[in-house]
């Protein structure tokens, strides 16, 4: 028969709450009581149930994480950072995939409430009024990762997407490229799609380039297949392009795949620049030059920010991390006539 906390309390001749204090905050328990409890735990080989401890202390040391697409490698790298932070700080992670569905978001929040998670991390998607009501309805502390909200006062951590795209486009321009195309996220995506498109357009204007957005920008959902199809359309509509800036590494790999099939040499004929610096950027041939986000640090920082909230510490509301240009092999200097 499994040993319970009541068995330990009986053997040590203390209350159940004293047992719990010994397990969670031993420094506040009198030394003689603490010693009796530890001896009873050892003698009975008691292993406390995390949920039972949570019912007593109103904390389960579990963080709920909501992601829109768990199959995307970006979230795997962010989740690694979250796991590292949670492990260091004595917590666990519960991961739910919303698949960008309001119903699945609601279902996930219901499960997380039942499991008594201490707080929530919401990733990547814009926080709509409906999302906000669902999230607020849990009564749980909330941190946004790789997204933010200007409408609601919600703590967040991410890069400046507009500036990152601007710097990426200016890098291509600095390499001599003037006929540059973009494979963008959807402009309706106010978190990454629109800001990155705006950064690309601002760079072109600052460099004095004539930019026909209808001709040189294609859109998709940051996936390999969307990058492939977008590159195919650009190759037909804008055959004179010398560089393409894809708004995710997956899209950039799709572009590389199409160009290879079409017999276009990268980077000798067309340069390709990605965005994110996921692990797959180093697996491409040629290895992908990309605008890097500190993905694992975003995940780590989101957990750190949430746990500080749970401890009653008020920190920076919107944390912005730096991006960086990671130069590999897929971008070459463009020299007219060569």
Image (cartoon, rainbow, N blue to C red):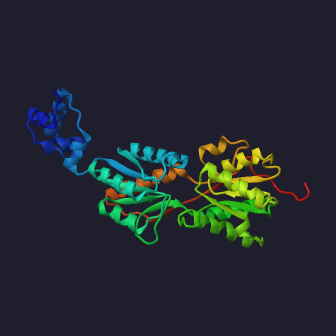
Q: Position of residue 248 (x, y in %)?
A: 62, 54
Displayed quadrant of residue 185: bottom right
Is 12 placed left or right of 88 in the picture? Answer: left
Up the image or down, 336 lies above or below 78; here it is: below
Residue at 78% over, 61% down: 238
Is 61 placed left or right of 85 in the picture? Answer: left
Q: Position of residue 225 (x, y in %)?
A: 63, 49
Q: Quadrant of the C terminus?
A: bottom right
Is 78 placed left or right of 108 in the picture? Answer: right
Displayed quadrant of residue 16: top left
Residue at 68% over, 42% down: 284
Residue at the right extreme, as displayed:
337
The front one of 8 and 244 is 244
Residue 26 visible in the snapshot: no
The front one of 220 and 292 is 220
Up the image or down, 271 lies above or below 318; here it is: above
Q: Position of residue 94 (x, y in %)?
A: 37, 46
The front one of 93 and 225 is 225
Displayed quadrant of residue 4: top left
Tag count: 0
The front one of 221 and 15 is 221
Q: Position of residue 219 (x, y in %)?
A: 63, 61
Residue 332 visible in the snapshot: yes
């Amino acid at each position: 028969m499994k040993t319970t906390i009541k068995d330990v309390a009986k053997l040590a001749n203390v209350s159940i709450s004293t047992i719990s204090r010994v397990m969670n905050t031993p420094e506040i328990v009198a030394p003689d009581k603490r010693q009796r409890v530890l001896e009873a735990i050892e003698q009975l080989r008691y292993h406390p149930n995390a949920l039972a401890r949570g019912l007593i202390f109103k904390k389960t040391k579990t963080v709920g994480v909501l992601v829109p697409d768990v199959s995307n490698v970006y979230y795997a790298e962010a989740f690694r950072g979250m796991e590292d932070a949670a492990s260091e700080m004595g917590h666990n992670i519960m991961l739910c995939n919303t698949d960008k569905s309001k119903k699945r978001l609601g279902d996930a929040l219901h499960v997380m409430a039942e499991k008594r998670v201490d707080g929530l991390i919401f990733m990547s998607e814009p926080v709509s009024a409906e999302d906000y009501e669902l999230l607020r309805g849990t009564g749980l502390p909330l941190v946004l990762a790789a997204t933010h909200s200007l409408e609601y006062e919600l703590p967040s951590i991410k890069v400046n997407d507009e500036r990152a795209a601007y710097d990426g486009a200016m890098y291509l321009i600095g390499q001599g490229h003037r006929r540059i195309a973009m494979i963008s996220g959807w402009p309706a995506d106010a978190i990454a799609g629109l800001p990155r498109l705006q950064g690309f357009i601002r760079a072109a204007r600052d460099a004095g380039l004539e930019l026909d957005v209808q001709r040189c920008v294609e859109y998709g959902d940051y996936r390999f297949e969307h990058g492939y199809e977008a590159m195919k359309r650009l190759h037909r509509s804008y055959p004179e392009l010398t560089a393409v800036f894809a708004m995710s590494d997956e899209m950039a790999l799709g572009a590389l795949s199409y160009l290879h099939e079409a017999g276009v040499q990268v980077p000798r004929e067309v340069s390709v620049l990605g965005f994110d610096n996921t692990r797959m950027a180093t697996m491409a041939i040629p290895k992908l030059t990309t605008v890097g986000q500190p993905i694992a640090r975003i995940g780590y920082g989101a957990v750190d920010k949430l746990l500080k909230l749970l401890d009653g510490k008020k920190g920076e509301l919107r944390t912005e991390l730096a991006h960086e240009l990671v130069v590999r092999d897929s971008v070459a200097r463009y020299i007219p006539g060569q």
